[in-house]
Amino acid sequence: MSRCPRLYDYEDAAFEHADPARAEADFAAFTEECDLARKAVARASLDDEFTGAPGRTLSLRWVYTHMIEEYARRNGHADLLRQRIDGATGS
């Protein structure tokens, strides 16, 4: 199996490196990656397993759960930032 190039460097991720001029292209790349991921697992079972780095066996169920947790965490962070900006809390 060939390795794909990394799109992002998570070791050096920082808001200071964000380029607003690239926002549309970055979002398009993100959307394309999501579409490719959906196609890759379209016929897979949640119990299907694969070897991830560094040699860990993961199930598709674990990946989905992990991604839900990560998105929830990031959304929580974004909400905290928004609250600091506009002061609104609650629903």
Image (cartoon, rainbow, N blue to C red):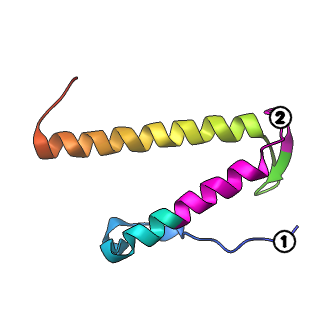
Image quadrant where residue 66 sits: top right
Query: Is residue 45 on the magenta stretch?
Result: yes
Query: Residue 86 in the image: x percent, y percent?
Result: 12, 42
Among all residues in the image, which is located at the extreme left? 87
Amino acid type of the residue tagged 1 in the rendering: Ser
Which segment is the magenta one?
29-49
- Which residue has dot 2 on it? 45
Q: Is residue 50 left or right of residue 35?
A: right
Amino acid type of the residue tagged 2 in the rendering: Ser
Query: Residue 50 in the image: x percent, y percent?
Result: 85, 48
Image quadrant where residue 82 sits: top left
As measured in the structure, the alpha-carbon distance from the residue carrying label 2 to the one carrying label 1 is 23 Å
User: 10 Å neighbourhood of mark 1: few (<14), some, or many (≥20)?
Assistant: few
The mark found on residue 2 in the picture is 1
Q: Is residue 48 left or right of residue 25?
A: right
> What residue sits 21% from the left and 24% below the top?
90
